[in-house]
């Protein structure tokens, strides 16, 4: 008989956080191709069956991990106060929070190429959130007299889609200078073109 004592079992929350941390660590250090249930289980100190019971694929686990850490670090869209700043300032500030890792964007692009329905659901949810943010920004701009009325959904999504393209395809750094230039030369002119 062994005198070894077993480590106390992790609570469900502790286990989930450990799995999420392991997933993001593997993504950031080893790349998406190494985000496997086997590697995640090994790094998080749990068994693969625990992972298989909760997630169908490593990508679904990765999405949940990214959302978990985003939700902890970002103020809820409903809590953001857009008053007291210009339309331009509000758009730039909202876009400056668009910060996904290049490895995560690469994973999304790979799964998009596979026509993964989970990615399609992710984009539907993401677009709803982006539309909500832009509708709030544009409503404040209307109240402030900067614009007469709102714009089409395509124009509302334009800045986010351009940043997504930059992050996924060009893999360029999304600097504040780039975001400001994008807003000045593309986004604001598109909004103003629909004010006539």
Image: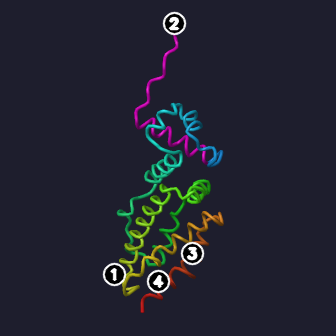
The answer to whether 64 is drawn above or below residue 187 in the figure is: above
Q: Percent x, y for residue 83?
A: 37, 73
- Which secondary structure lies at badge 3? helix
Marked residue nearer the N-terminal end (3 or 1): 1
Marked residue nearer the N-terminal end (2 or 3): 2
**Residue 99 painted magenta:** no
Residue that mark 2 sits on: 1
Q: Quadrant of residue 113?
A: bottom right
Residue that mark 4 sits on: 191
Query: What distance separates the C-alpha of mark 4 from that of mark 3?
Result: 15 Å
Residue that mark 3 sits on: 180
User: Extreme front residue here?
Assistant: 115
Q: Residue at x 41, y 38 (%)?
A: 13
The 10 Å Cα crowd at callout 2, few under 14, some 14 to 19, many 20 or more, is few
Q: Quadrant of the C terminus?
A: bottom left
Residue that mark 1 sits on: 143
The 10 Å Cα crowd at callout 4, few under 14, some 14 to 19, many 20 or more, is some
* Predominant SS along the magenta part: helix
The answer to whether 29 is drawn above or below residue 99 in the figure is: above
- Which secondary structure lies at badge 1? helix
Marked residue nearer the N-terminal end (2 or 4): 2
Q: Quadrant of residue 162?
A: bottom right
Given residues 172 and 38, the one toward you in this image is 38
Marked residue nearer the N-terminal end (2 or 1): 2
Which of the two discs, 2 and 4, sits closer to the camera? 2
Query: What distance separates the C-alpha of mark 2 from that of mark 4?
Result: 74 Å
**Residue 5 painted magenta:** yes
Q: Is there a contact, CB below 8 Å, between mark 2 and mark 4?
A: no
């Amino acid at each position: 008989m062994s005198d070894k004592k077993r480590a106390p079992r992790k609570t469900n929350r502790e286990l989930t956080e450990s799995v999420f941390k392991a997933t993001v660590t593997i993504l950031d250090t080893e790349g998406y191709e190494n985000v496997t249930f086997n590697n995640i289980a090994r790094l998080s100190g749990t068994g693969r069956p625990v992972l298989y019971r909760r997630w169908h694929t490593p990508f679904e686990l990765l999405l949940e991990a990214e959302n978990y850490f985003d939700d902890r670090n970002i103020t809820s869209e409903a809590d953001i106060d857009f008053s007291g700043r210009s339309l331009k300032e509000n758009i730039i500030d909202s876009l400056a929070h668009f910060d996904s890792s290049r490895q995560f964007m690469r994973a999304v692009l790979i799964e998009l190429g596979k026509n993964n329905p989970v990615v399609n659901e992710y984009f539907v949810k993401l677009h709803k959130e982006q539309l909500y943010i832009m509708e709030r920004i544009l409503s404040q701009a209307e109240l402030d007299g900067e614009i007469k009325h709102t714009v089409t959904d395509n124009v509302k999504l334009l800045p986010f889609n351009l940043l997504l393209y930059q992050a996924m395809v060009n893999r360029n750094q999304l600097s504040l200078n780039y975001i400001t230039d994008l807003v000045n030369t593309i986004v604001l002119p598109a909004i103003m073109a629909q004010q006539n």
